[in-house]
Structure formats: structure tokens, C-alpha cells
Image (cartoon, rainbow, N blue to C red):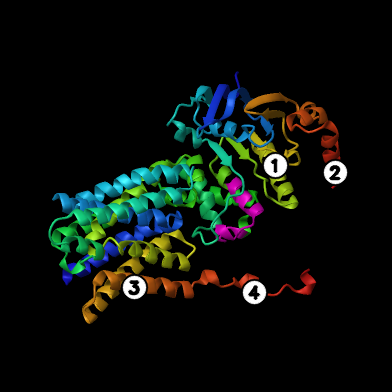
């Protein structure tokens, strides 16, 4: 249980931080596509007998290498191309699962996630990725802020925004890979998107959005784990449902939905 | 002393099947205010992108502020060239305020690993004051009108302390009042700071009166260049925009009446 809590905290921080990029750069579909690519890669590893993590990382990076230029150039409608890659990844995942001899329990574990069976090495890996993701956000905050605000503007003031875009895609691939076993290939994207989307409802300050997203990510993991323990139900599902509830609460109570105080006052006739 | 800050020689730029520039040569002197006019697709914006190093040359050469542009070396140059684009679609929920967006202008010159210091915020506040946006400094950027956003873009560009000031249709999609205000602001900046300025527009009424020289562009080529009074004649405009002279005269008379 201690391993599960640590995995939840670290995975929650890493996934939610990545989620801020996904939300602010309006690329949720790219994130879904990369998480399925990681899932397909892990299944390839299981089928051919090498470390599923290496397979997940390799295939998600390959997906990023195809998606990156599409997002960067904005030439074709990227959603269409990403849709094609997404369906290919899902198809490959089920193909590898079908080709896999013997029991499919390993594959199903990757699909649904099994945070309770995480080992010490899983936690170390999660810890490294969480530290790298948060560290990069802190060190390169101003470049990241400019890149997610407007990539062309960032480029025009001399920031290597294309490099940062690829860096963000690389970090997304790495985070999804190490969180795959805990949360599961089908559910991980909710843990990326929901906490960041919730934070987005609540603040007009980007640094605060990163912080709130990480807090919501950790809360989703911990509350999800608690429900999983109390009712003996799959932890991946409870974590995702919790993160969705947090998002709904944030959306309902969002100050961004309210009319600002300076707009509420009626215009007085004398001022017309 | 040679005061040429931009020297473009036989530049050819292509985007996939379309040739945007087909052998353009141009020299701009320090402190000069150049207006670039022409129909859509004439290659006006592309000229600006090769000056700030974002465009890719197929042929020819570009020398800006002593730098020869080759693919990949544009970052250091872009820190010295300010660029204001058309009004952008900004997410109303974007978690950044006006002051933070203006600060982006200083991020390039600050370089990696350095945080904005007191001096940088002072420059940002001075630029906000100059463009008349101090009262909205803490407002979320997505809550501003098109005209206010362009003022912020100009402040961001000036916070960069550029040596060259590029404006790409900065008044497109703005209302009449906002357009007039932006044009006055651009003139004020040029008059007080003597920045080398290139101003692109397809709309003649949006061409600042401060222009020293006007370049007329058509089909990826410089079609004519000279003093504004010589260039912006009914005859030339009718050829530039492929319109009968009578139609051009009528259109211009209507604009004056309005």
C-alpha cells in the first residue's frame, strides 16, 4: 500500500504537470494518441519478450516524431492526421494482444493499470520522471510560458520554441510510459487532462495553474486509492473517476464563468 | 558610412507549390520607415519573415544588422528585430495577464536560465505606459478587445528594445477608431525612437503618413518603389490591384468622404 501511495503521488504530479501543456496548447487529442501509442508499444514488448517500458517509450516517441511536425507546421488539419495515427495505435495494440500466446493477464494489467502491484523500481522510475518534469518547468518556466501562449510569438522574440515543443512531446511520452503500469493505457489520459483542466477553470496565473494541477493530480490519486481500498474496486478507474469529479466541481465553481464585478454595475444614464 | 541595415538580394522563397517571393532585392537604411503595399498573396508578409529569420530562402541572400541569414541562425537576430502580427485569436481563459505578455518581449534577450529582474519589469511598465495600457496591466490578456491586444503586442515588441520594427497588417480587423489609434502610435514610436520600420498592409487607408518610402508588391515581386506621393497614384493602384482607374478613383473618393 505504501508503494501504491507513493506511485499515486508521483504519477499524479507528473501527469498533471504534463496536462497543463496539453490544455494550454489545445492538443488533447495528441495526448490521447500518445497514450495509446505507449500502450501499443508496451504490448509489443510483452509479445516479443522485451521490457514493455522500452516498447512503450519507443513507440510513443515514434508517434511524437510523426505528430510533432504536424502540430508544428499546422499545415494539414492536424486532428485528422492524429486521428489516423490514433486509430492505427489502437489497432496495433489489439493486434499485439491477439498475437500474444498464452494468458493475457499482463496485457490487461497494462490496459487497466495495477498501482497496488508497483515495485520499488517502478517508484524510482516514476520519481525520476516526476523530478525531471517539474524541474524542467521550474528552470525553463519563462520559455515554456511563451511557447504555450503563442508559439510564433515566442519564435519571433528569439526563443527556440520548436525545440520546446518537441521537448514537451518527449516529456509527455516519458510520463505516459512510466505511469502506464500504475494507471493503465486506457485511463491514463484522464489523469493527464482532468487535473489540468480543473486548474484551468480556477486561475488566471500560469504558475498557479501548474501548482493547482499537481495538487489535483495528487488528490485524484490518493482519494481514488482510498475508494479502491474501501470498496475493493479497480484503482485505475477510481483515480480517473475522482479526477473527473474534481474537474466537474472546478467547472461549476469556476470564477471564470462569473461576470466580473466591473461589468455587473449598470451603466448610469449620466455617464452615457 | 554605410547605413544599410537590411539588404535583400534576389531572394526566392517558396511554400510547397506556391512561390511567395520570386527574386526580390531591397535595401533599407537605418531609421527609414518603409510601407509595403499590395494585394493578398503578393509576398508582403514573406518579406518580413525573411528579415526576422523565420522564412526559408531557396535562393539569394539576406543580410540584416550585419548578420547573414542561414537556416538555424535566426534566434540571435530575432532578439534584435521586433515583430507585430495581425490580431491573434487568444483564448479568453488563458492564464496570463497583460504585464506578463509584454514581458515575453524580454525573454529572448534575457536568454536561458535568467529570470526577469526589477529592471525588466520597469521596462515593461514604461512600455505599457507608452501604449496607454497601464490601467489594464493586470487584466487577463484574453479579456482585451482587438485594438487593446494590438497595443499590448506593440508594447511587447518595444520591451524587446529592438533595432528593427516589423508590423504585419497590425490594423487588420480593427474598427476605425482602433485603427487610427494604432497608426498614430506607430508614427509616435518612429518619430521618438527612430527605429527602422517596415509596415505591411493591403489596405491603403491603413498606411501611416509617416512612410519615407512605399514599395508596391505584386505576384512575389517588387513592382514599383519610391516616394509615397509618386507611388500611390490612381494609375499605379489600378494596375497593382487589377481594377479600372475609374473604380480606383471612386473608391478613394468614397474613403475621403467617409
- Give the residue at mark 2: B254
Magenta segment range? B136-155
Residue A28 lies, in percent from the top left, at 41, 57
Within 10 Å of disc 2 (Cα), the crowding (few <14, some 14-19, many 20+) is few
Mark nearer the N terminus (1 vs 2)? 1
User: Which secondary structure, mark 2?
Assistant: helix
Labels 2 & 4 near each other (Cβ < 8 A): no
User: Which secondary structure, mark 3?
Assistant: helix
Q: Using the numbered discs, state the Cα–Cα distance from disc 3 to disc 4 in whole angstroms.
A: 36 Å
Labels 4 & 1 near each other (Cβ < 8 A): no
Q: Total label count?
A: 4
Q: Residue at x 29, y 56 (%)?
A: A176
Could you say which quadrant of the image residue A266 lies in? bottom right
**Mark in front: 4 vs 1:** 4
- Whether callout 2 and callout 4 share a subunit is answered no
Q: Using the numbered discs, state the Cα–Cα distance from disc 1 to disc 3 in whole angstroms.
A: 57 Å
- Is residue A199 in view from this perspective? yes
Q: Residue at x 68, y 42 (%)?
A: B186
Report the chain holding disc 2: B
- Give the residue at mark 4: A264
User: Which secondary structure, mark 1?
Assistant: helix
Q: Using the numbered discs, state the Cα–Cα distance from disc 1 to disc 2 in whole angstroms.
A: 28 Å
Of the pair A227 and A164, the residue shown nearer to us? A227
Could you say which quadrant of the image residue B133 lies in? bottom right
In the image, residue B28 above or below residue B175 = above
Report the chain holding disc 1: B
**Horizontal relation, residue B211 to residue A131: left or right:** right
Image mark for residue B188 = 1
Amino acid at each position: 500500500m505504501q508503494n501504491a501511495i507513493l506511485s499515486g503521488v508521483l504519477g499524479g504530479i507528473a501527469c498533471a504537470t504534463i496536462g497543463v501543456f496539453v490544455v494550454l496548447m489545445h492538443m488533447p487529442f495528441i495526448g490521447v494518441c500518445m497514450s495509446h501509442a505507449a500502450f501499443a508499444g508496451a504490448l509489443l514488448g510483452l509479445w516479443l519478450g522485451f521490457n514493455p517500458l522500452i516498447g512503450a517509450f519507443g513507440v510513443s516517441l515514434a508517434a511524437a516524431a510523426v505528430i510533432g511536425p504536424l502540430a508544428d507546421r499546422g499545415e494539414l488539419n492536424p486532428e485528422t492526421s492524429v486521428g489516423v495515427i490514433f486509430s492505427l495505435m489502437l489497432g496495433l495494440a489489439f493486434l499485439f494482444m491477439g498475437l500474444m500466446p498464452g494468458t493475457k493477464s499482463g496485457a490487461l494489467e497494462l490496459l487497466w493499470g495495477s498501482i497496488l502491484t508497483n515495485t520499488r523500481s517502478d517508484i524510482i522510475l516514476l520519481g525520476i520522471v516526476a523530478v525531471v518534469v517539474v524541474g524542467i518547468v521550474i528552470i525553463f518556466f519563462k520559455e515554456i510560458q511563451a511557447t504555450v501562449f503563442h508559439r510564433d510569438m515566442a519564435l519571433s522574440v528569439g526563443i527556440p520554441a520548436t525545440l520546446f515543443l518537441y521537448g514537451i512531446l518527449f516529456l509527455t511520452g516519458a510520463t505516459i510510459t512510466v505511469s502506464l503500469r500504475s494507471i493503465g493505457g486506457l485511463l491514463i489520459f484522464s489523469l493527464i487532462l482532468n487535473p489540468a483542466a480543473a486548474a484551468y477553470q480556477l486561475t488566471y496565473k500560469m504558475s498557479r495553474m501548474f501548482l493547482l494541477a499537481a495538487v489535483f493530480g495528487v488528490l485524484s490519486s490518493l482519494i481514488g486509492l482510498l475508494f479502491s481500498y474501501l470498496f475493493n474496486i479497480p484503482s485505475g478507474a477510481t483515480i480517473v473517476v475522482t479526477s473527473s469529479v474534481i474537474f466537474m466541481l472546478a467547472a461549476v465553481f469556476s470564477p471564470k464563468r462569473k461576470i466580473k464585478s466591473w461589468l455587473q454595475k449598470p451603466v448610469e444614464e449620466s455617464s452615457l | 558610412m554605410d547605413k544599410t541595415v537590411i539588404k535583400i538580394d534576389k531572394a526566392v522563397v517558396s511554400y510547397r507549390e506556391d512561390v511567395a517571393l520570386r527574386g526580390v532585392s531591397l535595401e533599407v537604411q537605418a531609421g527609414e520607415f518603409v510601407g509595403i503595399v499590395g494585394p493578398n498573396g503578393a509576398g508582403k508578409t514573406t518579406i518580413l519573415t525573411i528579415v526576422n529569420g523565420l522564412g526559408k530562402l531557396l535562393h539569394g541572400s539576406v543580410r540584416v544588422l550585419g548578420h547573414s541569414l542561414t537556416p538555424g541562425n535566426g534566434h540571435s537576430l530575432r532578439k534584435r528585430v521586433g515583430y507585430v502580427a495581425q490580431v491573434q485569436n487568444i483564448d479568453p481563459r488563458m492564464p496570463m495577464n497583460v504585464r506578463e505578455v509584454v514581458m515575453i518581449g524580454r525573454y529572448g534577450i534575457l536568454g536561458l536560465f535568467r529570470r526577469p529582474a526589477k529592471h525588466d519589469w520597469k521596462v515593461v511598465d514604461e512600455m505599457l505606459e507608452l501604449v496607454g495600457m497601464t490601467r489594464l496591466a493586470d487584466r487577463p490578456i484574453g479579456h482585451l478587445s482587438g485594438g487593446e491586444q494590438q497595443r499590448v503586442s506593440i508594447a511587447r515588441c518595444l520591451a524587446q528594445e529592438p533595432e528593427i520594427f516589423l508590423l504585419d497588417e497590425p490594423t487588420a480587423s480593427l474598427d476605425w477608431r482602433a485603427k487610427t489609434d494604432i497608426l498614430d502610435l506607430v508614427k509616435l514610436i518612429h518619430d521618438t525612437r527612430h527605429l527602422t520600420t517596415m509596415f505591411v498592409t493591403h489596405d491603403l487607408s491603413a498606411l501611416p503618413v509617416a512612410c519615407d518610402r512605399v514599395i508596391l508588391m505584386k505576384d512575389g515581386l517588387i513592382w514599383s518603389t519610391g516616394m509615397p506621393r509618386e507611388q500611390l497614384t490612381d494609375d499605379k493602384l489600378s494596375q497593382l490591384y487589377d481594377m479600372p482607374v475609374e473604380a480606383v478613383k471612386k473608391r478613394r473618393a468614397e474613403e475621403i468622404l467617409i
